[in-house]
Image (cartoon, helix red, strand yellow):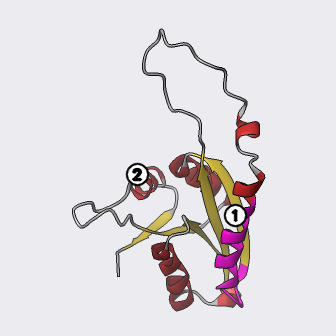
Amino acid sequence: MKKILLPIDGSPRSLRTIQVVKQSYIPAETEITILLVVPDPRPSKLTDENDEVTPMPDHEEITQDPQTKEEARLLVESFAKMLPGYQTTAALRFGSPGPEIIQFAKEGGFDAILMTRSSRGSTQKLGSVSTYIVQNASFITTTVLREA
């Protein structure tokens, strides 16, 4: 059984991965995991070492907004429903998308990652997350789809 990871962001372009799966993989021979990473709202760094800092709650508290979790769960499940006949799993993570996708792929023993590129204009070949995945996922086959 081939294990495919589909990281999504909820955009219309991420729907293309569903089309490619249907065209390229046989349902009885393919296990699909649809992953949504919700970005962590914590600030990435301080601007000045003398700034006063209010302690942030730990990671678990920040990521437990029930509305965000429910919306994300519904989005991932809606993508899974678009693949009838396939064995699908929906997964939700919180954090920085690139590193979370890489860690999830390592933990899950996937055969491939299938994702779309950013739609930030014709001059940018890959978005930041796609670039991160390509640069850091040498342990797995990664396919980044072009714009249609």
Mark 1: give few (<14), some (14-19) or many (20+) Cα within 10 Å.
Answer: few
Q: What stretch is highlighted in magenta?
A: 70-87
Residue shown at 45% from the left, 54% from the top: 129
Q: Residue at x 64, y 85 (%)?
A: 82
Q: Where is residue 88 in the image (x, y as percent from the top left)?
A: 72, 77
Q: Residue at left 56%, top 68%? A: 10
Residue 147 appears in view: yes
Q: Residues within 10 Å of mark 2 (few under 14, many from 20)?
A: few
Up the image or down, 142 lies above or below 68; here it is: below
**Residue 71, disc:** 1
Amino acid at dot 1: Glu
Residue 125: % across, % down: 28, 62
Q: In which quarter of the image is the N terminus?
A: bottom right
Residue 107 in sight in this render: no
- Which quadrant holds residue 37? bottom right
Q: What residue is shown with label 2?
A: 135
From the viewer's perspective, tell me whether residue 111 is left or right of residue 125.
right
Distance in Å between CA atoms under marks 1 and 2 = 30 Å
Foreground of the two, 77 or 62: 62
| Residue 111, percent from left and from top | 58, 68
Secondary structure at badge 1 equals helix
Quadrant of the frame with the C terminus: bottom left
Residue at (43, 21) in percent of width and height: 47
- Amino acid of disc 2: Gln
Classified by dominant secondary structure, the portion drawn in magenta counts as helix
Label whose residue precedes the other's in the sequence (1 or 2):
1
Question: Number of callouts in the render?
Answer: 2
Q: Is residue 1 magenta?
A: no
Q: Taking 73 as reference, is 61 above or below it?
A: above
